[in-house]
């Protein structure tokens, strides 16, 4: 009987320890990737944003598949145009699900980008699927997929605001 109790305690302890490690990893990802992602986006800093991506990234949008990292050049051009127009950008996002192990994380969520140019504000909503890998001890985005349409329906305020208890960044 003592052996069974000991094994149960060890299993529970092991699960608790694994949970704590995953929480630490997720906090590391939050600080090193998501906090920096939001900051770079809102500062309109394409270089900082692009540095969060791996050297080789798969980027998928409704416009197609980018395996040549041309999205990084597009980021620089788009952010330069926003700076020239003295735009103010606000990015909010939350996670619907996150699955993480020691060196890979698959994260799904919703975003809202508000861009103010002069007195006009445009708001765009969408869903993202991101794969992160730990490369040379640094978390990098290796796959980035996002869309503004799910099941034929445009992602909007209603979908974004259903975040409930999920964390908003």
Image: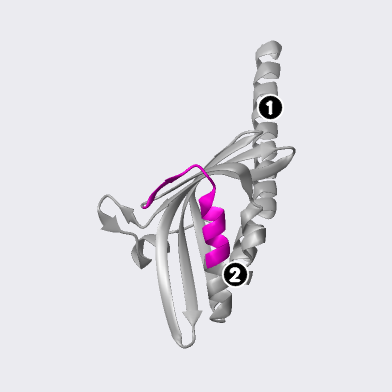
Q: What element carries label 1?
A: helix
Question: What residue is drawn where x is 42% and y is 54%?
Answer: 127
Compared to 50, does 89 lie above or below? below
Label 1 sits on residue: 14
Mark nearest the camera among 2 and 1 is 2
Would residue 115 be found to the left or right of residue 38 on screen?
Answer: left
Would residue 86 be found to the left or right of residue 102 on screen?
Answer: left
Q: In which quarter of the image is residue 9?
A: top right
Question: What residue is drawn where x is 64% and y is 36%?
Answer: 19
Is 65 inside the magenta-drawn segment?
yes
The answer to whether one can see residue 48 in this image is: yes
Would residue 22 be found to the left or right of residue 114 on screen?
Answer: right
In the rendering, at what x and y percent does residue 134 appear? 67, 38
Compared to 87, does 110 lie above or below? above
Q: What element carries label 2?
A: helix
Q: In which quarter of the image is residue 160?
A: bottom left
In the rendering, at what x and y percent does residue 154 appear? 30, 60
Residue at the left extreme?
152
Is 76 inside the magenta-drawn segment?
yes
Q: Which of marks 2 and 1 is nearer the N terminus?
A: 1
Label of residue 99 in the image: none
Is the residue marked by circle 1 packed among few (<14), some (14-19), or many (20+) residues within 10 Å?
A: few
Residue at the bottom extreme?
119
Question: What residue is drawn where x is 34% and y is 60%?
Answer: 155
Label 2 sits on residue: 42
The residue stretch that appears in magenta: 63-77
Residue at the right extreme?
137
Give the position of the C terminus as an image quadrant.
bottom right
In the rendering, at what x and y percent does residue 104 appear? 60, 36
**Alpha carbons under labels 2 and 1: distance apart:** 40 Å
């Amino acid at each position: 009987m003592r052996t069974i109790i000991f094994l149960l305690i060890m299993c529970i302890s092991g699960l608790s320890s694994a949970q704590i490690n995953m929480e630490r990893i997720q906090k590391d990802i939050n600080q090193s990737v998501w906090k920096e992602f939001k900051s770079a986006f809102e500062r309109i800093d394409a270089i900082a944003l692009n540095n969060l991506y791996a050297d080789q990234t798969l980027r998928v949008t409704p416009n197609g598949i980018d395996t040549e990292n041309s999205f990084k050049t597009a980021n620089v051009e788009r952010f330069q145009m926003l700076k020239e127009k003295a735009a103010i950008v606000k990015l909010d996002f939350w996670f619907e699900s996150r699955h993480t192990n020691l060196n890979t994380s698959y994260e799904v969520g919703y975003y809202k980008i508000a861009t103010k140019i002069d007195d006009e504000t445009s708001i765009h909503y969408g869903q993202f699927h991101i794969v992160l890998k730990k490369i040379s001890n640094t978390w990098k985005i290796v796959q980035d997929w996002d869309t503004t349409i799910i099941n034929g329906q445009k992602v909007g305020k209603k979908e974004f605001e259903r975040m409930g208890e999920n964390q908003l960044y």
